[in-house]
Amino acid sequence: MRYLPLTPDDRSLMLSRIGAANIDELFADIPRDKFMRALPDLPRRKSEAEVERLLSRMAAKNTPASSVPFFVGAGAYKHHVPASVDHLIQRSEFLTSYTPYQPEITQGTLQMLFEFQTQVANLTGMEVANASMYDGSTGCHEAVLMAHRITRRKKAVLSGGLHPHYADVVRTISHMASDEVVSMPADVTAAEDIIAQIDKDTSCVVVQSPDFFGNLRDLAPIAEKCHAKGALLIAVFTEAVSLGLVEPPGAMGADIVVGEGQSIGNGLNFGGPYVGLFATRQKYVRQMPGRLAGQTQDADGKRGFVLTLSTREQHIRREKATSNICTNSGLCALAFSIHMTLLGESGLRKLARVNHANAAQLADMLSAAGVAVLNDAFFNEFTIRVKGSAQQLVEKLASQGILAGVPVSRLLPRAGLDDLLIVASTEVNTDEDRATLVEALR
Amino acid sequence: MLNNQGRPTQPANNNEASSRRRETFTGNRGLQQEEGLIFEFGRAEVSGVDIDEPAQFKPRLGKFERKTPLGLPGLSEPEAVRHYVRLSQKNYSIDAGLYPLGSCTMKHNPRLNEKMARLPGFSDVHPLQPQSTVQGAIELIDELEKWLLELTGMSAVAMSPKAGAHGEACGMMAIKAAHEARGEGKSRHIVIVPDSAHGTNPATAALIGYTVRAVPARADGTVSAQAVREALGPDVAAIMLTNPNTCGLFEKEIVEIAKAVHEAGAYFYCDGANFNAIMGKVRPGDLGIDAMHINLHKTFSTPHGGGGPGAGPVVLSQALAPYAPLPVLGVDKTTLPGKSFTCLIEQEPELAGTARKPFGRMTAFHGQMGMYVRALSYMLSHGADGLKQASEDAVLNANYVRARLSDIMSLPFGDKPCMHEVLFDDKWLKDTGVTTLDFAKAMIDEGYHPMTMYFPLVVHGAMLIEPTESESLASLELFIMTLRDLAFGVLRGETERFTQAPRLAPRRRLDETAAARNPILRWTKPEAISVAAE
């Protein structure tokens, strides 16, 4: 077997040096009546070429985003990732290294995380960020738990513009932990009065902007009311590129900012792996979940980096930890950080402007074609009303080679919103793509 | 004078009042190059990506245009490539050497898996595009489920958890949902966790509102069924047990433990971090386990990436299967008239009238597809025969290390066979002036990543070595000879070789206390620091 270096002779020699008559003597503690005598009922080993053929056949049954006019968003976005990003994250020393528990020989990962944390803090307008979460949705429930620890209250209020699956994740954990959740009804046009829900028992309010339907939301008045009542504002985003052009949550008074970082440096990957971004105010840092890289000095006085404040974490604090998270999204954070470094401030601004221009132009074209666009302010995504079922329309267009968007009913099946379609347009869309979509929706 | 990158700010002269020995002008040591932070040499106006400004258009941002500065430096592509290559050279990796971190299973990461995960049909598909356009992706998940179920002998699998600890949460929530369905959700609030467990186990139990009750291990490093029986009661929801355990031993009373747990109306959660020891040798489902996560990033070789991403699918027993979280695989006959295809069921109403009662949702989408592809590629490559051989070789390698070091290093539970990792304690270091930490740091100077140290907590000064099946006999021999040489060095009194280590790594020991006392968690402009200091 090509991945196993030991030969039969090696194994015999090793067994004799160990003093075992055969390999199964080393497994003597397994109860004999449970010990497997036969191989599992699975195929035998395959060559590289055979595996490649099998998996390529499966892959060929899927329609890649790059192969068609593609307008699917709602939490994950198709962007161009520079070739150097994927090359660099495949450097052996990044790809096949473990969590940096031995800082003297993992300065590469640690310095990268320190840079990543700074990038995320600056992007979100916050003071500190951690070394990543699994994805935006799990970061969102961690933020709610963190707010509960800080406020010592147990009620979260979720905006009707929050991604429905993020809300599901928060409700799942909250139910298990016996915490209260108030979920506002689906709010297509950012019209809800969430401020009225904030009272003396409220731990946090969770608001997404751009929201699930694409709307940009004003967080400042919500933050103001939260702070007056001793609650925290958790701001969520699923499209990190938007922060190149849109006022960041940190500037609007958010206390915790969580988001999905997939858009920068990471592919669609059918939903994962992605990278959760998590930022907050300095004063809350000891209640943060996840790993933190910090700066220090070595025995010679040279600058170096270590994992720090680990007394918050499970391997030290066990049941008193701020989270159970261990492995996070290190390599996706690296991809994010490299892509962000390649973009820089000027590149990110331009990328964000191109995204916004493409979506604004598409919205104008659709309006002109008589399709109702429901949003007022948006970034690169908006919601339209179609004739009949959006679900059936999307299936029909898929069979014509157009991936037109996400039917709201797919995530909110019983909300009576069956004729709504969420459409995203990023820098990858061409004029021709947009014309094709408008023609198909006319 | 040195700047904050550890580099000199001017050429040396004889009057310089610095006690620090300077090896080179640059601070570099041959191939080992010092590297600043992007914030120190990147520039806001530079970009490594060419993007044209959009043509004239009517903005739709309302009042939300960004006024806050971004503070994000850019680098051209050559500068960026050099920065990250230089950073990478400061990392140890399994590709460069044996990585004996116990409990972490740092095995070889086949590059075929990377190639397969990058096929556009897997890497460039959106989780919410119509399921008719991702049938191959769903087929891959279905196939991976079949392999996991056959290898573990369980009834169902929840695929979406994103790492081991997330899988633990998933399994424990399935258990809580099952108790709730029986009306015992509130009354059963205790979870039994042995002292030797990974920190994630008690943290997970606490996360979802359980109180932890510890059970001690016996003198032989395993948990006795009797101790578990004594800890059980009508208030106990579950036990969380790692098997093989963190001492590198198979829990030999596991069948009795499972029986006692079930008789008390509780469920058995098994931490599957150490599954690499037992593939094709025994199936967790045959031992009475109700839920177990599998770290695809350990057993099934998906790369660790410096701390993730991982993947932690959870296999479930018949009793817990109905509670698996969304999404679940099913057969769809409704979406397209006259067509039926395998689909991922994403919403609860679609399950009306079935026995499935998902407890909720773990994550926004379907889990770690990129990791599924890599894991299935690994499984197909090995086959049933190769996976069994991998476990046997992993156990053989660990036992070889044990046999060749047991005369000089101390084994806390006696010299008997271990599973895929071998645990030493620090009795043999007593009165030498060298600690487990010192010994580990000296390994760095010899070109090895240290073993897991000070874990499990039940053993003093623990050193947990997991060589994995990826090591050749020659590689193991060199590792063993190195540890023997170090051990003899300790006994000969070469204390400085240990207390001063590492001397040859990119950095010497780092001041973790200072880092925690005055946390610097982000780069700030140096002027700002000096103003704050005044």
Image (tube, rainbow, N blue to C red):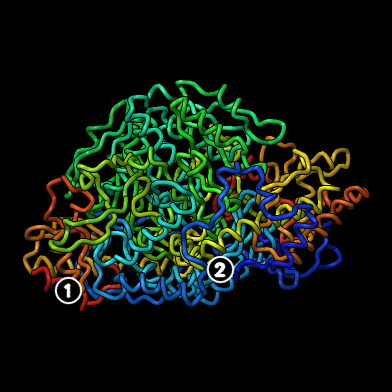
Residue B235, by quadrant, is top left
Q: Residue at x 42, y 41 (%)?
A: B317
Q: Residue at x 42, y 49 (%)?
A: B161
Amino acid carrying mark 1 in the image: Gln
Q: Nearer the viewer, residue A342 or B298?
A: B298
Instruction: List x then y, in percent, for residue A331.
Output: 51, 60
- Is A421 situated left or right of B134 in this image? left
Circle 1 — which element? loop
Q: Label 1 is found on which chain of the structure?
A: A
Neighbourhood count class around disc 2 (C-alpha, 10 Å): few under 14, some 14–19, many 20 upward: some
1 or 2: mark nearer the eye: 2
Amino acid carrying mark 2 in the image: Pro
Instruction: List x then y, in percent, for residue B35.
Output: 64, 66
Q: Residue at x 47, y 50 (%)?
A: B312
Query: Mark 1 sits on what residue?
Result: A400
Q: Residue at x 57, y 39 (%)?
A: B199
Query: Mark 2 sits on what residue?
Result: B110
Compared to residue B215, the image places residue B131 above or below, namely below
